[in-house]
């Protein structure tokens, strides 16, 4: 499998490291408008691969170098500075994605390529990428709330004293401040969350749920405050998505993709079945009245931001 990564900043480099670590790529090509940066990353990663999987990693200085890619990962663009929201990046990253996608499409096989979008604000960038690429919606996949869902599962697992892997709970909607924690659909070890809490004598009060939601929503801000940017979590999320596609695993991931057409088109995260064809089906969890209202509101925010870019 050949994988191209466009944008080799903090996120692109972490994605490259994590994807190389899956052992699933035969070849990886790195492109950044800063060629020096891409070459340095390819060199460093190439040395690292001597200790793990044999993957050919090269930097390319034009888009011809991505020809033959099965998956193209878009990680280019401005990131949040401390205090900035993802939506604050809208204008800058519309220009970045509008520059990249036509070049990607001119150099890939439109019948099979899949694009993974990482650039923020994520859902609007998925809509823009799908519109510019004209690919079937299921092959333009945003990492969406994969990372938010991972954060929720980690925090909830710790609070309940169980492995993260035993927790099935989703964050839905925008990969941003309006995302919704789907408490009503959460389960642990196959038991509805409330039943699990009753049987294990855990108490998850409304206040503690609110605190968990706050921590999930604010995780990126906290990491950016302390580290300047976030990269490890998203690197692992993209590698997991690549694994799911490459092995046709058909796991259920909260990724973002466009549904609907014209004025009704909207990208947001829902639990979706992902395999080698991309997203093959989308699921609608049973939500409470307030969660449903929150999800509708989240959709309206994404759509309004997309309308604001005038594309
Ligand atoms: P960064 O500033 O470290 O790197 C961005 C890179 O993009 C730079 O190397 C720059 O040269 C390159 N670039 C910019 N315009 C380009 C173009 N037109 N063509 C090719 N390369 C171009 O930023 P980062 O921390 O790596 O973040 C990248 C993006 O990922 C941001 O939009 C950030 O918000 C997003 N992000 C998303 C998630 C998620 O969960 N989806 C998580 C973290 C970060």
Image (cartoon, helix red, strand yellow):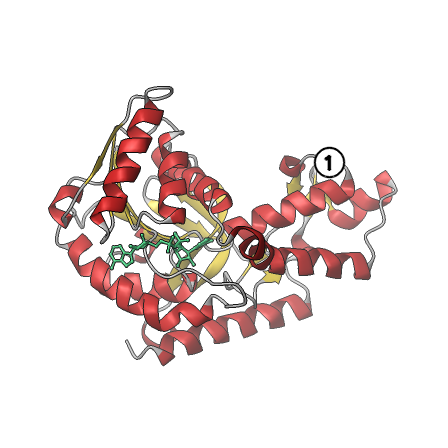
* Quadrant of residue 206 within the rendered picture: bottom right
Identify the residue under disc 1: 162
Give left or right: position of 251 versus 47.
right
Give left or right: position of 40 versus 166.
left
Q: Looking at this view, is 47 or 197 the one in front? A: 47
User: How packed is label 1: few (under 14 Cα within 10 Å), some, or many (20 or more)?
Assistant: some
Residue 275 shows in this picture: no
- Classify 108 as above or below 96: above
Which residue is at 31% across, 47% downward?
Answer: 8
Q: Residue 76: x and y, percent?
A: 32, 55
Q: Residue 234: x and y, percent?
A: 47, 46
**Picture mark count:** 1
Residue 218 shows in this picture: yes
Q: Residue 291: x and y, percent?
A: 64, 66
Quadrant containing ligand 1 reads bottom left
Q: Looking at this view, is 159 or 290 the one in front? A: 159
**Residue sticking out furthest to the right:** 201
Mark 1, secondary structure of its residue: loop
- Classify 155 as above or below 144: above
Q: Looking at this view, is 99 or 274 the one in front? A: 99
Which residue is at 34% across, 29% downward?
Answer: 24
Q: Residue 296: x and y, percent?
A: 55, 72
Q: Quadrant of the N terminus?
A: top left
Q: Quadrant of the C terminus?
A: bottom left
Q: Looking at this view, is 293 or 11 the one in front? A: 11
Give left or right: position of 225 versus 262.
right
* Quadrant of residue 112 within the rendered picture: top left
- Classify 210 as above or below 69: below
């Amino acid at each position: 499998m050949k994988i191209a990564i466009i944008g080799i900043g903090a996120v692109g480099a972490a994605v490259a490291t994590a994807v190389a670590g899956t052992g699933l790529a035969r070849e990886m090509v790195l492109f950044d408008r800063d060629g020096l940066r891409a070459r340095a990353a390819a060199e460093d990663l190439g040395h690292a691969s001597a200790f793990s999987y044999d993957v050919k990693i090269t930097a390319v200085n034009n888009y011809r170098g991505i020809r033959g890619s099965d998956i193209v990962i878009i990680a280019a663009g401005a990131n949040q500075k401390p205090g900035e929201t993802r939506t604050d990046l809208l204008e800058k990253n519309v220009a970045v994605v509008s520059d990249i996608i036509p070049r990607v499409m001119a150099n890939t096989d439109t019948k099979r390529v899949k694009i993974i979008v990482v650039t923020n604000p994520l859902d609007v960038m998925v809509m823009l990428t799908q519109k510019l690429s004209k690919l079937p919606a299921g092959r333009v996949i945003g990492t969406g709330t994969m990372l938010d869902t991972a954060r929720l599962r980690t925090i909830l697992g710790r609070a309940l004293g169980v492995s993260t892997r035993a927790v099935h709970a989703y964050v839905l909607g925008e990969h941003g401040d309006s995302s919704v924690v789907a408490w009503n659909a959460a389960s642990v070890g196959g038991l509805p969350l409330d039943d699990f809490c009753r049987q294990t004598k855990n108490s998850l009060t409304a206040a503690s749920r609110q605190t968990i939601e706050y921590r999930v929503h604010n995780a990126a801000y906290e990491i950016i405050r302390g580290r300047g940017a976030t990269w490890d979590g998203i690197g692992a999320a993209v590698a997991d998505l690549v694994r799911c596609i490459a092995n046709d695993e058909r796991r259920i991931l909260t990724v973002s993709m466009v549904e609907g057409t014209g004025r009704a088109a909207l990208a947001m995260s829902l639990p979706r079945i992902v395999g080698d064809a991309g997203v093959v089906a989308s699921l609608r969890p049973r939500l409470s009245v307030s969660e449903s209202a929150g999800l509708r509101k989240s959709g309206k925010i994404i759509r309004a931001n997309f309308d604001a870019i005038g594309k």
